Image (cartoon, rainbow, N blue to C red):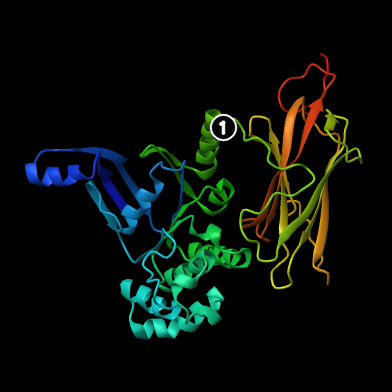
Amino acid sequence: MSVITLVNVSKSYRTYAHPWDRLKEVITHRSYHQDHQVLKPLSISIGEGHVVGLVGRNGAGKSTLLKLIAGTLLPTTGTVTTQGQVAALLELGAGFHPEMSGRENVYLGAAVAGLSREFIESRYEDIVQFTGLAEAMDRPVKTYSSGMTARLAFAVAMAVEPEILILDETLSVGDGAFARRSFERIIDFKSTGKTLLFCSHSMYQVESICDRVLWINDGMVMMDGDPSEVVSAYTEFLTGQSEPPNPTHSSDSVPSASTSSGGTRIMDVKVFVDGYESKPLTIESGSSKLSIATRFKAPDNLPLPSIGIVLVGGNGWPIASASSLDDALRFTRNPEGIYQATVTFPRAPLLKGNYWINLFLMCEQGIHFYERAERVAEFTVVQNTREVGLVSLNRSWKTG
């Protein structure tokens, strides 16, 4: 059964060269505007219980599409039909009154969603407990940080118990502990067979959560299908458009986190070749041993995290990866809350070229990123054979 149906839907905006042109158009009944088409005509059907990801560059039309589905925008052409209650987190604090307290905004948001005061009163304590903002609920929302606003908005949206949930990158500003709880709630939402639309620039999370992905580019659906196929095609498109960014951090330090980690954080990363932390790092193909050691801190109130390592080629494509979760490595909790792990690639099979290493500190399910450190080290691979490609595969020959 389809719960979201778009038929020949497009969205355009009028643009004027000068502010007075709008008034001149009204008075003279002549056109002084140009139509800027953000979303070209498209038709999409999304079934009940599907988790659909949206990927695409900034300005591609993803947010416009989500706003049309949420009903906060009207289409220029076509029709949008949804079945069931829709809850959307599109912009932080959208619908919140800055002068009203967090408590008052909870009731306001519930009323806008069509919920009774009695219903929200029965859920109020659960909402506050989930946000962790008990001490701030009687303060005006205008005094909240962006992370606090994200907590309140997400908690209110989930309290609505929608059949359709729309998320547009709004969880990336929350602190690590809250973001982890939010992803747990999203997984629970998915397991109940409800419909989720998830827009994110994190390809890893899109592949982990979604069972279908739409690639939007220049207001059009470029590809619609299996997450791994769409993400691979989109990544290839991106890497073909630009060169990898210049390194901004040396291997002596860990880059700052992309989100606040809520106490779970990378402390340091060291890279060794044959046991030596030399600079520059040079690896002999098929002979050298590459080791990556990391220390991290984890609080007692969260499950111990997992570690992901990605080896990236000079063109920006991931070449290989390793995960403590996939390799069944388990940490033992200690009173200091400081942990360390080393992954080793013996006789590194990489062929000649330049590479770098990205490291990720993730939740115990390997979905939410607490912190990531990109380009923690760069290294060059040299070889004395005539092999070409990226890796040297184990092989055997025989005659006859």
Expressed as whole percent of the image width and height from the top left, the position of residue 15 reads 26, 41
Work out whether residue 268 or residue 367 is closer to the camera in this orientation and state it.
268
Which residue is more in the foreground, 61 or 143?
143
At x 80% / y 45%, what residue is drawn?
Answer: 252
Amino acid at pointer 1 = Thr
- Locate residue 225 relative to residue 34 in the image: left or right: right
| In the image, residue 389 above or below residue 310 | above
- Residue 259 placed where, x, y %? 61, 57
Please identify the quarter of the rendering in which residue 267 is found: bottom right
Q: In which quarter of the image is residue 394?
A: top right
In-front residue for pair 192/203: 203
| Residue at 47% in and 67% down | 154
Q: Residue 111: percent from the left, percent from the top?
A: 32, 76
Looking at the image, which residue sits at the far left?
28
Q: In this view, which residue lies farthest toward the top?
A: 400
Say which residue appears at 54% left-offset and 77% top-offset.
133
Whether residue 384 appears in this view of the structure is yes
Find numbered disc 1 in the image and state the secondary structure of the residue it sits on: helix
- Crowd tier of the residue under label 1, counting other residues whose Cα lies within 10 Å: few below 14, some 14–19, many 20 or above: few
- Compared across the picture, whether 120 is left or right of 302 comes to left
- Please state which of residues 350 and 28 is positioned toward the viewer in this rendering: 28
> In the rendered image, which residue does mark 1 sit on?
239
